[in-house]
């Protein structure tokens, strides 16, 4: 199951950009596996991504529960010592979830951290996403680029 979780984690970013339906399926499947088989390092990302669905999908829009899922995923990063997944988790939590409940400026430092961690652990795709999100939120919050 851990290999499946690693594989699904690798697919989530590309499916988010190309096939949203497949992305939703992957995220919900990762959460199901985490609940039924136990937590692994990828579970932190699964719960963060599930929280982002809760905060952004028009049918649900439950930002309070999404914020709780984001906090849970950040806590799981600490408990499971999964710093290598910090870039992906921070990108999801601080762009898709926290911007719904907090000011954009409060997401800038965590996104900068996500960029640095992504580069350090070879998660270049999430480092690039974090840099893009950082620039976007900086622009919308009136910061100098």
Image (spheres, rainbow, N blue to C red):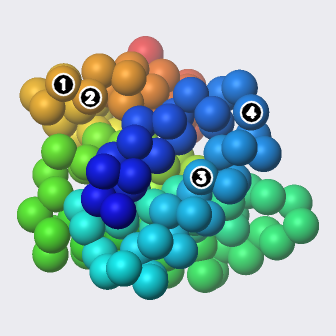
Q: Nearer the viewer, residue 130 or 28?
A: 28
* Residue at the spot of label 3: 26
Point out which mark residue 19 bears.
4
Residues at circles 2 and 1 in contact by the CB criterion of under 8 Å? yes
**Secondary structure at numbered mark 3:** helix
Residue ID for mark 1: 122
In front: 37, or 91?
37
Left or right: residue 14 versus residue 91 is right
| Mark pair 1, 3: CA separation | 22 Å
Reading the image, the residue beneath label 2 is 123
Mark 3 vs mark 2: which is more N-terminal?
3
Disc number lying in front (1 or 4): 4
Q: Secondary structure at mark 1?
A: loop
Q: Secondary structure at mark 2?
A: loop
Identify which residue is drawn at 29% across, 59% down. 2
Residue 67 visible in this rendered orientation of the protein: no
Query: Quick one: label 3, few (<14), some, or many (20+) residues within 10 Å?
Result: many
Q: Nearer the viewer, mark 3 or mark 2?
A: 3
Q: Give the Cα distance between marks 3 and 2.
A: 19 Å
Q: Residues within 10 Å of mark 2 (few under 14, many from 20)?
A: some
Answer whether labels 4 and 2 touch (C-beta < 8 Å): no
Q: Which numbered circle lies on residue 5? A: none
């Amino acid at each position: 199951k851990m290999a499946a979780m690693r594989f699904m984690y690798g697919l989530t970013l590309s499916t988010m950009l190309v096939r949203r339906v497949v992305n939703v399926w992957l995220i919900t499947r990762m959460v199901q596996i985490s609940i039924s088989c136990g937590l692994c390092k990828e579970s932190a990302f699964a719960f963060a991504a599930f929280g982002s669905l809760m905060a952004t999908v028009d049918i649900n829009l439950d930002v309070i529960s999404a914020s709780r899922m984001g906090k849970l995923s950040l806590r799981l990063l600490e408990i499971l010592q999964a710093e290598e997944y910090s870039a992906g988790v921070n990108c999801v939590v601080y762009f898709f979830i926290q911007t719904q409940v907090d000011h954009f400026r409060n997401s800038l430092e965590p996104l900068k951290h996500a960029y640095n961690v992504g580069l350090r652990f070879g998660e270049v795709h999430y480092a690039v996403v974090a840099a893009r999100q950082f620039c976007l939120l900086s622009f919308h919050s009136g910061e100098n680029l």
